Image (cartoon, coloured by chain):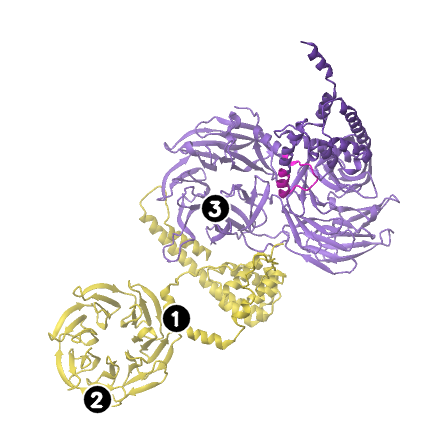
Amino acid sequence: MVEESDVRVVRFGGSKINLRPPIISTDSRFVLCTSGDSVKVYSTRTEEWLHSLQGHTNQVTGIALNPANHLQVYSCSADGTVKLWDFIDGILIKTFIIGYPLFAIYVSEKHEGIVFLHIAMDTDSKKEGFQLVAVHLPKSAEQEVEAKELSAVSSHISPNPSCTAFGREGQYIAFARNLQLNVYFFRKQKTYSFSLKATDKKGAKNAFTCIACHPTDDCIATGHEDGKIRLWRNFIHKKEYTYSTQHWHHNAVNTLCFTPEGTNLLSGGIESVLVQWQYGTGNRKEFLPRLGGSILHVSASSDGQLFCTSHSDNKITVIESSFKVCGVIQGLVKGDAVLTDLMIDPRSKALVLNGKPGHLQFYSLLRDKHLYNLDIVQQEYIYEAGLDQFEVVKAAFDIKGYWLATVEERGQKSADLEFFLKLWSYDERTQSFVLNTTITAAHTDRIISMCFSSSEETTMLVTIAEDGQFKAWCQGVDADTKQDQNFWSCDFVGSYHNLKPTNCSFSADSSLLAVSFQEVITIWSPDTWELLTTLCQPPGVIRDLCFGRLSCSKYLISTTTRNLLCCWNLLTCALEWSTSVEVSKLQSDPLSENVAAFSYQSKHTDLFVFKPNEPRPLFTHKNVCSEKIHRAVFVPREEPLNNCDESSQWLNRSQLYFLTQNMDLLTFSTATEEDRMLSSSTRLVIDDSVAVTPFYLLLGKHRQQQQKLNTPSHQAADRPQQPQGSVTITELLHTPAHVLPPASVLCSMFVSSLLISNTGVLQDPLRKEMESSEQEMNSEKEEEDSEGEMEACDSQQELRVQGSVDEVTPKLSKAQERELKRVRKTDFSWMAGLIASKP
Amino acid sequence: MASFKPTKVQFLPKLGEKVTEETLYWKNYKSPVQIKEFGAITKIDFSPLPPHNYAVTASTRIHIYGPHSQEPIRSFTRFRDTAYGGSFRGDGKLLVAGSEEGLIRLFDISGRVALRQFAGHSKAVHVTSFLSDGFRVVSGSDDLSCRVWDVPSAVELSSLTEHTDYVRALAPSKLNPDLFVTGSYDHTVKVFDMRSGSSVMTMQHGHPVECVLLYPSEALLVSTGGRYVKVWDLLKGGQELVSLKNHHKTVTCACLSSVGNKLLTGSLDRHIKVYNSSYKVVHNFDCDASILSMAIAPDDEALAVGMTNGVLSVRHRRHQKDKETLTSRRRRGPSYQVFVKGKNFVPRQDDFLVSKPVKQYLRKYDKQLKSFEVSKALDTALQTWTRTSKPDVTVAVIIELNRRGTLKNALAGRNEESLTKILNFLLKHIFDPRFSRPLLMVGDIVLDLYQQVFHESPVVERLLQRLMEVLGREAELQQELLQVLGILDTLFASLTPRKEVMAHAAPPVAQESQLQAA
């Protein structure tokens, strides 16, 4: 057994970006959203992911712009900290340690230095009680500050963070829970509460689902479970409150948002229609339908020009105020469960799984970017709770990626199951898949599994179904019609004692087809459709089947439900070896002999990687995660690694990705890979505060090259320097104007930089002056530091220096430079004397 | 924002007949023109000359019809008894006919009175024809003889009495004026050569021969009789090439189409079958009564069929230009130029292209579905035209409604009229295996919804009664079919050699799945 050395489990990208409402920056250039344990920054124009703010150690549960500085953002996390970031440069400014898991954050302009947080009331008790607390953030220069000044605003609030909102100019805060609306007035320090009846005669469901306050008017909008929107007014007096009701949504209203001027109210729900209500004009509204998944959050930019909706299919849509979609940021879609296996498109090497309802999604693992959705069902999706609709349940690619087979199903719960088998061919011209054949009644019962033959010449699809049959489908068998045969038809129907098949697999050269029927594995020849042999090793129903690859192609590996992993030798038709392991997922690497087995035992999953020809595992990783793993895939690498280390050798050709039951996509990475990733990430941090778009990267590279060219010139100190190459000037130009010393100081520096530096005594006073001015500058800087902005600037520069360290030409740090200067300044004339005296 | 995805109408191929070029060609006839004659039509012959008039022999007259006339343009009525076998000469100017009394008459097309009468047969003459030189007439009679007559002198040239039963079929050679083929009820087909004055070839058909036919190359000979159509190769000395048994009653007539030499046979079973060059049936015409005679005009312009009940049915070929005139008469819409205007403009290189969003055109029911008007969408789909000519569209809308979970809403709250529409649609299509599944569901929902109010409307009640009857019948049928399938399965099982595993052949199982789907 080899212990884990440098291979470790890494959470791969594509986490949820729709947990909390996204934020648009004040200048409308960036969209920020929470994503796992980081905050992601996207560009609104290009929809590209710029960078992420990493530092939290647990799920980020809320973000809010700092009302005092629009370039900063607060984030709170379940790890009990609030962090303040400069989101443009991605720099962590401060960390406030609260000490309790936090669930949401609210800020208000009026309450400077105070953030409002959701914390769990009692972590021990089972009841979900949440508390709204105000935290005074202490001012101090330190990086990490403990904020201990907690004061409860209200206890027993709704766990849903959209049920809390600040009122006009932060005068009051409104929060709703179940059937009660509470308004807390800060000035009076009083809470008014208004409650509704649970239902009425018409069957209304009045529970609150979300809340929004008008920015300039005393008006609160609340959304309800039955789709009603109520506008509350006059709630300053406890008894004389009024409300008006508007009803358009037919399911619960998920989110409400007033535009910054308060002219419009935006609402969204399960219907996936963004509704814009004109405030004060009753029932005038505009619609933007079919946005994707159901709308979870809506937010508006501070100038009201952009809206942002986040959807249940892990998507953020950027919408102009004229109600036009201008950008879509799509994360990895994870439905309720991934019904299709994880697959790799052989052409684009993209990860393929079902995503949006009725679609297959193609996700580039290399770039962590959603590529496109392929519409399989091709029907209008109806956004309605509890409606049974078609879902893609199975998909398979042939070996060249020319054919794609999909199965869509509807009515899993009810008795009448409907399903279609569809075959798609790849169209070179449109670079996408085109529907070729639809088979309506492929089997009489549900299709359990399917696979394509792996030979290059003939493509054949085998499906197995619960009606006890397996069918082979070929392209153009039907000889009766003379038309151009390009569609698929049934070639062979097979069964074995009417047993229910469980799995099917083709051997590496497609000369054998293995179909498992309960406890029996049958081996067929696809050419003649003859049953060659049967293999059986009771007890236990066969769960997984896979043939060995390359040099191990004579082996067939099977796992059973009764904790048995068997390896059959197909030449002798005998059991080669077997071990007792509970295997939940067996996956073979298409590029090597390796087979990965995920075993679930005593509440954690272990990974074993082995070659079929020997019963000894190549690699073992204990406790990969705590859930059962049913989906895994080997992804071929672009360029193979050359790890010699035995434990990581199996990752050389391809990478193993797997999906846990919590829909986390995890992978194994090796040390060398991580190094490479790290270097690439440092390269990404680029000096200016311009948005990092690909175009910019291109330009930035160009600029770096220029710098490279420039650096040698000021290394040779003796040569006359070009003004633009001088360190002083670049420094001058790069430091922000407001932190620069007065011009009179700079002037002399500037002039001196233009002088041709000669050796010696003559220059000494000038140099000294310069140094002193520099020191002055530094001290000034330290004084000015209170805002923390300078710090950002400084660290940014440091980062820049770090980045350049990687490059070949050594660029000197400031301290080194100063040292050099000092050496140059010291009088070496006594040396001359020494030399002269010696002979 | 994705656009609305319209309802997908599933294209399900109809089981059974496959559409081929042949069927398309033969289907391209207009609906037949029916002309009533006085008695059974025994012979139809097309004139070889252009307007291609045709002579129809029925009862005691011979009528000559023009290619498109409903009324005879000329008729020969000077027969005392039933006339038989009126046929044209090669130049279309003379017509010869036999009769029940044994006389053979020769007519000029433009005249009325017989030019010549050939007397000599002692019994009825059923078949007469000119030999290809045009100066001799050959006849076959019930007195077992075939005679050849000289037209100018009206004398009998020879009499051939080799047949032992009635001579009822005759075909002169078009290439050699001395050759002709006769068929008789003595089950033989004989080829006579006038130069030798006797038969040179005899073929055993095996049944009373009703009709003989020579291919234009005259290498092949077709004889019909009994239920059989046989093709003989004359160059191989009368070897039987193929024997066809596609009719289930006596085959009475045969003819060749002039395009591609397709063989057509007509029979007493009221069918005309069209064979391709490899003698497979490619098309089938149905008629109202037993067919006695049939002829096809040159270039297949018209197909005339004579029947026992005295009805002559003529099918004319449909032409492309007929259609054009039809459409042009209907309405003159805006010209093509109007639609193309501005569309074919090619932008130059430095032009700035402002793209306009393409408007999505939706069908009416799709528009209604888009705005969630489910009842209206169902109404639209149940409109008479859609319902009758495109039932698949109606069913697609029903399926879509069901998928949206609103089928019940759409079916609810209907009056008698619209309910009748739905029930009629169900009655018509509920057994179509393509539609039965959604339609059975519709039936269930209708029953659930209107249970209480059915008795208020006698119309709806009657329709339901009918639906129940039909369903019961279908259920019985299904059961019988399953029984047959069981028998077949046992047969197949006993046929396969004893093996551990039973691997079904593909077709029976596929059938089974279809049946179960039905």
The Cα atoms of the two marked residues, 1 and 3, are separated by 47 Å
User: Which residue type carries mark 3?
Assistant: Glu
Look at the image and give the colour of chain A: purple
Tags 2 and 3 both on a single chain: no
Q: Residue at x 30, y 84 (%)?
A: B63
Q: Residues within 10 Å of mark 2 (few under 14, many from 20)?
A: some
Q: Residue furthest left?
A: B196
- Total marks in image: 3
Query: Where's residue A495, x and y in %?
Result: 41, 45
Assess whether mark 3 and mark 1 are in contact (beta carbons under 8 angstroms). Answer: no
Q: Verify whether residue B288 appears in magenta.
A: no
Residue A636, which numbered label? none
Labels 1, 3: front one: 1
Which chain identifier belongs to the yellow chain?
Answer: B
Residue A466, which numbered label? 3
The Cα atoms of the two marked residues, 2 and 1, are separated by 41 Å
Query: Where's residue A780, x and y in %?
Result: 81, 31
Tags 1 and 3 both on a single chain: no
Q: Is residue A726 left or right of residue B318?
A: right
Label 2 lies in what chain? B
Using the image as rendered, state which of residue B370 and residue B292 is in the foreground.
B370
Q: Residues within 10 Å of mark 1 (few under 14, many from 20)?
A: some
Q: Residue at x 76, y 52 (%)?
A: A259
Q: Quarter-wise, where is residue B151 in the image?
A: bottom left
Label 3 lies in what chain? A
Q: Quarter-wise, where is residue B365 in the image?
A: bottom right
Reading the image, the residue beneath label 1 is B28
Residue B115, which numbered label? 2
User: Which residue type carries mark 2?
Assistant: Leu
Chain part drawn in magenta? A683-702
User: Which residue type carries mark 1?
Assistant: Asn
Query: Which type of secondary structure does the marked residue at label 1 adopt?
Result: loop
